[in-house]
Image: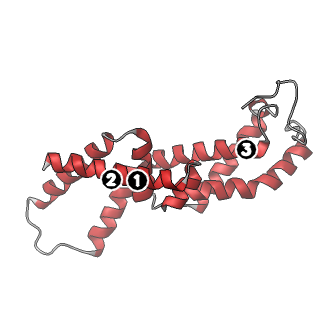
Amino acid sequence: MRHRPHAESTPGAPNLRDPSQFDAAVRDLRPAVLRWARIVLRDDAAAEDLAQDLFTQLWLNPEAYDSSRTSLRSYLRVLTRSRAIDRFRTRGAHQSAAQRLAVEQLSHPRAAESPEAPALRREVARQLLHALDELPREQRAAVLLAAVGELTASELALASEIPLGTAKSRIRIGLSKMRGVLDEAA
């Protein structure tokens, strides 16, 4: 792929230093940014926060966008996807899993739980985290987004900008490798 010289700009690229052009760009692109963020974050409020932060950053630092390299829409799509995945990870896959476990425990109280049960659950959690850590980065992200983020393979493919078959393979192979690690530990 050949890049255009930096002196040119994408036809129709807005001048982000001009408040009226910036406002028009936000008005036009905000719905798409929100949609892209929701795919990964699956949380309307978090998507709104991310969109607000992106547009604020763009307003404060308009030179970060180089119109000679890509369209503003493409630039924001990549930036949104990257930031959404970062926020999803920061929000804590571990925290989400712990919250779901807590809800599960509250909704299904254990009758006469043995004293060893909490230690056993901690050990299983430790083994699962170890198995996740053994996965390559792409497979770990796919497994976490599918299991903890509850993304379908189609949503994962769209959010990661990869083919659907690749998303399915990363999930399937990642889970298979985790099973192998867990079987070795047993």
Residue 3 shows up from this direction: yes
Colouring of the image: secondary structure
Identify the residue under disc 1. 171
* Helix, strand or loop status at disc 1: helix
- Residue type for callout 3: Ser
Residues under numbered marks 2 and 1 in contact, where contact means CB atoms less than 8 Å apart: yes
Q: Quadrant of the N terminus?
A: top right
Residue 4 at x, y percent in the picture: 81, 28
47 relative to 75, above or below: below
Q: Earlier in the sequence, mark 3 or mark 2?
A: 3
Q: Is disc 1 surrounded by few (<14), some (14 to 19) or many (20+) residues within 10 Å?
A: many
Q: Label 3 to label 1, Cα distance in Å?
A: 27 Å
Residue 144 shows up from this direction: no
Identify the residue under disc 2. 175
* Helix, strand or loop status at disc 3: helix
Q: Label 2 to label 1, Cα distance in Å?
A: 6 Å
- Residue type for callout 1: Ile
User: Could you say which quadrant of the image residue 54 lies in?
Assistant: top right
Residue 16 at x, y percent in the picture: 85, 38
Query: What residue appears at the point 27 percent right and 45 percent down from the top-left corner?
Result: 131
Query: What residue appears at the point 43 percent right and 52 percent down from the top-left corner?
Result: 169
139 relative to 99, above or below: above
Residue 76 at x, y percent in the picture: 71, 44
Which numbered circle lies on residue 15? Answer: none
Identify the residue under disc 3. 74
- Residue type for callout 2: Leu
Q: Earlier in the sequence, mark 3 or mark 1?
A: 3
Q: Is disc 3 surrounded by few (<14), some (14 to 19) or many (20+) residues within 10 Å?
A: few
